[in-house]
Amino acid sequence: MSDHYFTAEPASPDERRTLTLRLAGRSVDMQTAPGVFCPDRLDSGTAVLLNHAPTPPEAGTFMDMGCGWGPIATTLALGSPSAHVWAVDVNERALDLCATNVAAQGCSNVTTARPSQVTADVRFDLIWSNPPIRVGKKVLHSMLLTWLPRLVVGGRAYLVVQRNLGSDSLAKWLVEQLGDAYEVTRLTSVKGFRILEVVRTSDGGPTPLEAAEDTGAPAPNADV
């Protein structure tokens, strides 16, 4: 049975190869391997996000949600060296590749982590993601409702989603689920992909993790 990119521990051989691509205005060599998302190239959705999302702030706490082998995390780290970038994934091989790739570019401002390793006090000024649509709605929705409430007031998330894989319905769902404390808009549409912008405009009550801590219930979605 072949690995999915959301497999925690891929069984396929860890046969690494090098891709040369342009990130943050410079040529970089990045290692990839089977068992992670799009190991043979920079996928089109990620390229749209990197080329069309607004320039990140110079500093802050950023998140690459579903980092894979690290093109988004590397771009954020190189472009905003004063920021702290969390590169988060459930795939152990992806995390190892991402850590290798950011280190090769001299980036010391990246923390690679499984979701459960991101402590409850961490809040984000910026989230960039090419979210794993093919993992299924249940897991995808759980992931988004875990991490988007971690935005600080004024924080922004940029999600790139292919139009024919439900970007418009996802935007509508986000509006319904997040409520008045957030604004969800379609920032742009490029080559069949939408970039959705999610802005936290007010506090709007505790996050799901804070609510779980207050009630003594298990923290939700620790592994998404």
Image (tube, rainbow, N blue to C red):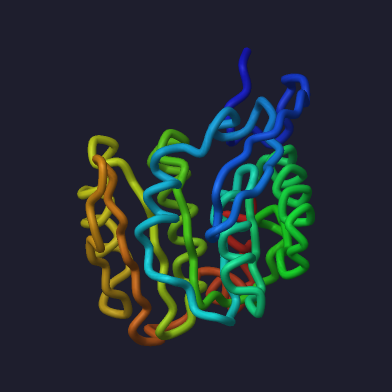
Q: Is residue 79 left or right of residue 114?
A: left
| Image position of 128 with respect to 204: above or below | above
Q: Residue at x 41, y 73 (%)?
A: 156
Q: Is residue 30 left or right of residue 203?
A: right
| Image position of 44 with respect to 106: above or below | above
Q: Residue at x 58, y 49 (%)?
A: 71
Looking at this view, is 170 or 223 the one in front? 170
Toward the top, the furthest residue is: 1
Looking at this view, is 113 or 64 the one in front? 64
Instruction: Report whether residue 224 is seen.
Output: no
| Image position of 43 with respect to 201: above or below | above
Residue 39, position as x, y percentages in the image = 60, 31
Circle count: 0
| Image position of 123 with respect to 131: above or below | below
Q: Residue at x 63, y 57 (%)?
A: 74
Locate the N terminus and report the quarter of the image it occupies. Answer: top right
Residue 189, position as x, y percentages in the image = 22, 52
Q: Quadrant of residue 171?
A: bottom left
Residue 29, position as x, y percentages in the image = 68, 43
Instruction: Report whether residue 81 is seen.
Output: yes
Looking at this view, is 132 or 187 the one in front? 187
Residue 59, position as x, y percentages in the image = 58, 82
Q: Quadrant of residue 136?
A: top left
Q: Is residue 139 left or right of residue 165?
A: right
